[in-house]
C-alpha cells in the first residue's frame, strides 16, 4: 500500500493511535498549545469576537466549529471567553465539533458537560462535509500534520508491505505536482484539497483559523517522525521498528503551509493572514487577557499562567516553530 494509506491506518484504523484517545500533555507523547494553557483558546476567541463586533448583527448568529477537538478543551476555552466578553453570545451562537471517532465524541460530550452542564449545546459532525451552515468560524489546532502523506524521493514513492518501506516509480500526477512545487524529496500531504472543498461547499461564509508546525515552503528533506513519551524518532532512524510503533506512537510531519493555502485558494478561500504563533497570539490579545487575569487572581496564579504563556510565545519553544493561518471565503470582515 502507499504510505498515506499506511499512515491513515496507523492513526485512524481499528487499532489506530487516535482511536485509543491518548493523553496529551505531560503524561502523554507530546504537548499542544491547547494542553499548555487555556489562554490559547481565550486568545482565539478574543480574535473571533473582534470579527463578530466589527461585522453585521448577523455575525452573532454564527457557528463556532472546532475540527479535531480531542478532549474538547479548546472549544470550551473559546466558549468560556466569549461568555466573559458577552454572555448573550452563548444564546445566539451555535457550537460544533467535527470528530469521526465515536469514542472521542463520547469523551468530548462528557467533558463539555463537566464545564457547562446543560447550558451549552455542542453539535457533533462526523466529517467536515457534513457541515451545512450559512456562517461559521472554524478553528483547528494541529490537524494538517495528521493528514496522511506520501513520501517522495528521487521520483520514487514509498510503499509499505508488512511494516517495511519500499520504493516504486511515482505516479505521473505526483511527479508533476512535485516539479511545480520544486520538491525532490519529502512529504506530499494527501487530502488537503478534498478537505478545503468540503468546507467551502458546506459553509457559505467562513473564517478558518488554524495552527500547526511547519513553514510556507518545501524543505526537500523528510520531516516525518514518531513521538513517544516526548521523545522524537525520525521515521528512517535505524532504531525505529514500525511494527512496534504502528498504532502505539504518534506519527507526524511538518506542514507545508503553501500547499494548504493553494488547496483552499482552489476552493474559493483567500489568505487573510499568516504569522508565527507568537505574533498571532499577541495580535489576538493574549497579553491583555493575562493582564486582566492578574487583577482577579493571586500573584502565584498569575505567575503560573504567565509561565505557560511564555511557552506559547517564546521563540525557542512554541512561538516561532508553530504558525497561524487565517483563511476566509464569502463576505467576511478584514
Image (cartoon, grey):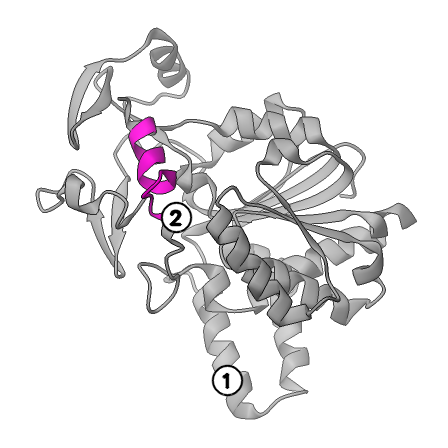
Question: As displayed, is residue 10 above or below residue 194?
Answer: below
- Taking the view exactly as shown, the residue that stands out farthest to the right is 57
Q: Does the magenta stretch include residue 55?
A: no
Q: Residue at x 31, y 43 (%)?
A: 15
Residue found at x 67% / y 25%: 268
Residue 292 seen in this snapshot: yes
In this rendered view, identify the residue nearer to me: 132 or 216.
132
Which badge, 1 or 2, comes first in the chain's sequence? 2
Judged left or right of residue 100, residue 226 is left
Give, as a single range, the part of the protein colored magenta: 5-17
Check the picture and name the quadrant holding the C terminus: top right
Q: In which quarter of the image is the N terminus?
A: top left
Q: Residue furthest top?
A: 172
Residue at 68 percent across and 68 percent down: it is 80
Q: Is residue 183 above or below residue 129?
A: above
Q: Quadrant of residue 206?
A: top right
Give the dominant element type of the magenta stretch: helix, strand or loop: helix
Give the number of the disc on residue 18. Answer: 2
Q: Distance between the residues labelled 1 and 2?
A: 34 Å
Tell how many labels: 2
| 75 over 226 or under it: above or below | below
> In the rendered image, is residue 262 in sight?
no
The answer to whether residue 306 is above or below residue 214 is below
**Residue hosting label 1:** 303
Which residue is nearer to you in this view: 5 or 265? 5
Amino acid at each position: 500500500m502507499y504510505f498515506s494509506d499506511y499512515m491513515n491506518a496507523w492513526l485512524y484504523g481499528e487499532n489506530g493511535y487516535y482511536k485509543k484517545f491518548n493523553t496529551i500533555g505531560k503524561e502523554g507523547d507530546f504537548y499542544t498549545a491547547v494542553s499548555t494553557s487555556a489562554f490559547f483558546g481565550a486568545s482565539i476567541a478574543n480574535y473571533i469576537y473582534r470579527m463578530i463586533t466589527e461585522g453585521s448583527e448577523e455575525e452573532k448568529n454564527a457557528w463556532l466549529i472546532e475540527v479535531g477537538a480531542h478532549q474538547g478543551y479548546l472549544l470550551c476555552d473559546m466558549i468560556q471567553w466569549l461568555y466573559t466578553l458577552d454572555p448573550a453570545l452563548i444564546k445566539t451562537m451555535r457550537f460544533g465539533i467535527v470528530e469521526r471517532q465515536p469514542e472521542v465524541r463520547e469523551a468530548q460530550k462528557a467533558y463539555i458537560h463537566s464545564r457547562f452542564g446543560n447550558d451549552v449545546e455542542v453539535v457533533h459532525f462526523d466529517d467536515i462535509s457534513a457541515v451545512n451552515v450559512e456562517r461559521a468560524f472554524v478553528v483547528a489546532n494541529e490537524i494538517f500534520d495528521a493528514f496522511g502523506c506520501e513520501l517522495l524521493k528521487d521520483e520514487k514513492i514509498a510503499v509499505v508491505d508488512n511494516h517495511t518501506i519500499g520504493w516504486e516509480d511515482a505516479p505521473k500526477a505526483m511527479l508533476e505536482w512535485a516539479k511545480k512545487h520544486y520538491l525532490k524529496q519529502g512529504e506530499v500531504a494527501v487530502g488537503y484539497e478534498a478537505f478545503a472543498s468540503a468546507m467551502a461547499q458546506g459553509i457559505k461564509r467562513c473564517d478558518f483559523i488554524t495552527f500547526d508546525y511547519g513553514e510556507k515552503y518545501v524543505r526537500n528533506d523528510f520531516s516525518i517522525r514518531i513521538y513517544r513519551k516526548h521523545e522524537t524518532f525520525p521515521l528512517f532512524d535505524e532504531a525505529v521498528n514500525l511494527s512496534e510503533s504502528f498504532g502505539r506512537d504518534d506519527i507526524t510531519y511538518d506542514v507545508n503551509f503553501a500547499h494548504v493555502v493553494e488547496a483552499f485558494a482552489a476552493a474559493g478561500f483567500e489568505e487573510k493572514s499568516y504569522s508565527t504563533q507568537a505574533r498571532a497570539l499577541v495580535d489576538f490579545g493574549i497579553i491583555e487577557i493575562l493582564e486582566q487575569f492578574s487583577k482577579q487572581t493571586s500573584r502565584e496564579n498569575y505567575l503560573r499562567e504567565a509561565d505557560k504563556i511564555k511557552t506559547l510565545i517564546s521563540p525557542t519553544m512554541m512561538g516561532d516553530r508553530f504558525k497561524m493561518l487565517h483563511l476566509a471565503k464569502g463576505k467576511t470582515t478584514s
